[in-house]
Amino acid sequence: MSEARIEVSNLVVRYGGVIAVDGVSFTVGRGEHVTLLGPSGCGKTTTLRAIAGLEEPSAGAIRIDGRAVYSSAERRNVPSEKRGVSMVFQSYAVWPHMTVFDNVAYGLRVRKLPRTEVAEQVERALGLVQMREFASRPASNLSGGQQQRVALARAVAFSPTVVLFDEPLSNLDAKLRAEMRVELHELQRRLGITSVYVTHDQEEALAISDRVIVMNNGGIEQVGSPETIYNRPKSRFVADFVGSANLIGGRMKSSPNGPGPVLFETAGGVLLQARAAHAPHGDEDRVAIRTAYIDLALAPPNNAPNAAAGNVRQRLFHGDFIQYIVDWPAGQLIVRRPPTELFEEGAAVTISFAAEHCVLLET
Amino acid sequence: MRGSFPRVSTQSIVTLLILLVCGGLVLYPMVFLAEEALNVGDPQEFPLQEWGLGNFAALGEDWHILANTGLVACLATVMAVIFGFVVAWILTRARVPGGSRLERLMELPYYMTPLVGALAWAILASPRTGALNQLWHAIGGNGDLFDIYSPFGIAWVMALFEGTVAFVMISAAMKSMDPSLEETSRVLGAGKFRTVMKVTLPLVMPGVLGATIFVFAEMLGSFAAAYVLGIPGRYYVITPDYGRAAAMGISLFAVMLVTLTIYRLIVRRGNYTTITGKAFRPRAMDVGRATWVLLAVCWAYILVAVVLPMLALLLTSFQRFATVIVGQMQFTLVNYENAVRFAAVRSALVNSLVLGFGVATFGVLFMTVLVWIIYRSRAPGHGLIEYVAMFPQAVPRLVFGLALLWAWLNIPIPIYGTLWLLALAYFTVLMPLGVRTLAGVMLQIDKSLEECARVCGASWGYQLRTVTMPLLRPGIVAAWLLLFIASVRELGVSIFLVGPNAQVIAPSIASAWLSSSTELSTALAIIQTSAVFVALAILFRATRRFSGELR
């Protein structure tokens, strides 16, 4: 597996009696950007810190470029500073007693590079984040966004091959966060680094990653491209946590082997055509439909599949979209439509969605 | 640079070394104390030949000494908590002019030390000859207004000069109360008085209770006032017999340990977040005309705890013969000359300063690494180190001095009777102070600042040098000065460990006083207090600059 830059296998991290990470395995390819996504306490940060060497695992192995930096079998635990990875911290961790230049130069000076090269590399790194003119500023009087940039410059200044990101944008306000997301995306790709990114913000995860690993309760729920995670959630947890989805209970009506839709009967007796990403085993009891994939129309329902009559119970104006709560025979549906599609509360509507957007959940 | 060493070995070797040093310094003397307490044979014999519970049984005969100690500690605690509560309430909850400066002044008595305070109050209020009693006679009063040699007098001095802790703890509790809790009550329609009774008091009570217990433990271990004032009044609180002293020390230690454990339990219980929470700047209450009354109360405290004592000491130190009768006063500098001329006294002064510098400098370096290991490392046993390091807190100084005496007498290294022993002793008993001060700052430093250095490729040593130490600087400065002050004023352990070639200032003050050279002892007290106040002034400046709180 020399293709993999980082290889985590059967990683277990315990805190006293609590198991924070419970047998997690995944690989990150060269130049790949992988995000660990999950709610707080799911073990994503612990996994990242274990890769950085800041947390000592209880079992498993972590390899970087094929070299074991942690292995319970070989009883090996390489200290942080010898792993050659870099990291951006949630709190930025910009040293307030140094200037911006000294902060960024730290990793280079530790490596005892000649003075001229240090200056050159710091200049380059600060240029990447548009902070060149701040080099001589004391780091203690920078704004949050500027500190974020300094932390970023410091993390990439010594040209590491692997950069770990621990919720780097979570302390910024919403607008700045959206801006930095774009910059970060660009920077990651321009430098050709391999990155592992931790966040609880699903939008962020979908926007900047090549691959998303959804974690819950110390384990992995699903691994896939952002599109796969969004369109083909495997479990209730993923469907619920990533994006917003309606989970509809019921039971399977048929189990055709091979491709094509399966038939699902909801609790209210509505028959739906659904898609399964896995080979159905027959006792699945839930489908997920993204709130954005449901169409509403005033025309009465025809006999097309996955169409039903409903009634608008409530309308909430959100600006970028309008959220409707619609009563239908299977209960209530949450539907998000662009603000151009306006329906009155109490209006009779027809609900419809494509079979490929009605996903049969494995668990 | 130590970058080439693998972290595991450097750090774990240092951790092990520090654990051994701490454990040795703290626990080894306690073994000797226990042994001596059980020793019913020759008190100089180690390892002991005969052992039994005779010393503990003999405590019954000394019951009056224990009763005295208990009585004085109780009286002093009650007084200290009342003073502390009233002044803390005035300075944190009521709007009085110059409040923040007054707060600093309130801490001064603690730094003046109970020894100096006892001296000053002996001059002010000894029966018949004391200044206040003379004044009372002059205006036609009968008998004595105060008798400082009574249990009440001893407790009074302890409350004034040792009780500052109560003020600091109670005002911390009052300060850390979220003002919105009171505001809610006001918004819901309760008046000022009702708010104080129904919201403020119940919320602050745990803090007051905690302070009471903590101060009681402090008072049990404090003996300076009783030592200076108890002997003239034949009110003994210590005993000359080594075996019995050890037994008494162990009993005292047991009571203190229980008290401090109760204190810890109270503080730990989660719902008392008013003590540990974030510091708020509470909105002070407008008290109208009562402002001046409250202000007067504060200044009265300053008057009896700082101004009067300092005046008494200054006045006496410049006199040929101590007197408070104006007509008989002969002013002279001879006491200060003597302080510098007498070899023993001069060497005591120099030694105290040398010890102060040495212990503070070495102590701060050692304790920084110690605190790092306790709060940051994941090395096994780091919790144990904290327990060991804080242990001397629970042992009365005098008892610990006794324990150290036996411990180091019975070790083949000839450091008994030298400054080295005093340095080791200071280092050991001041460890809790240094660790607490540094830990306060260490816990404020975001952990990821250090982790980031490691991920950037820095070794443990390099990270400590370039990130931890610089960030910890305000704490290091504060800890250095506090250790210096505490060394210069140290009496409890010194009293057993000084020798002809190793004199220090506090015991010299006490012995000059007890051998009736009042004038010389006041001159020495002024010199000691000046050294402490200079260090304190620097400390206040430094902490204000770093905007860090002292405690």
Image (tube, coloured by chain):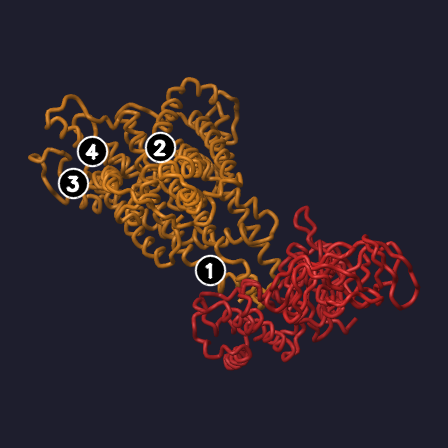
Chain colours: A red, B orange
Residue A14 higher or lower than B153, as above or below: below
Q: Are marks 1 and 2 in contact (CB under 8 Å)?
A: no
Residue A77 in view: no
Chain hosting mark 4: B
Q: Residue furthest top?
A: B61
Q: Are marks 1 and 3 in contact (CB under 8 Å)?
A: no
Tag 3: residue type?
Leu
- The chain letter under disc 1 is B
Looking at the image, tell me whether mark 4 or mark 2 is earlier in sequence order: 4
Q: Earlier in the sequence, mark 2 or mark 3?
A: 2
- Residues at circles 1 and 4 in contact by the CB criterion of under 8 Å: no
At 87% from the left and 66% from the top, the residue drawn is A261
Q: Which residue is mark 1?
A: B469
Q: Which residue is mark 2?
A: B223
Badge 1: how crowded within 10 Å, few (<14), some, or many (20+)?
Answer: some
Mark 3 / mark 4, whichever is N-terminal: 4
Q: Which residue is mark 3?
A: B315
**Circle 3 crowding by C-alpha within 10 Å: few under 14, some 14–19, many from 20:** some
Instruction: Read off the residue under disc 4.
Output: B123
Q: CA distance from mark 2 to mark 3?
A: 26 Å
As measured in the structure, the alpha-carbon distance from the residue carrying label 1 to the one carrying label 3 is: 45 Å
Report the Cα–Cα distance between label 4 and label 2: 19 Å
x, y percent for residue B415 = 42, 43
The mark that comes first in sequence, 1 or 4, is: 4
Q: Earlier in the sequence, mark 1 or mark 3?
A: 3
Q: Amino acid at mark 4?
A: Ile
Q: Secondary structure at mark 3?
A: helix
Q: Chain of mark 3?
A: B
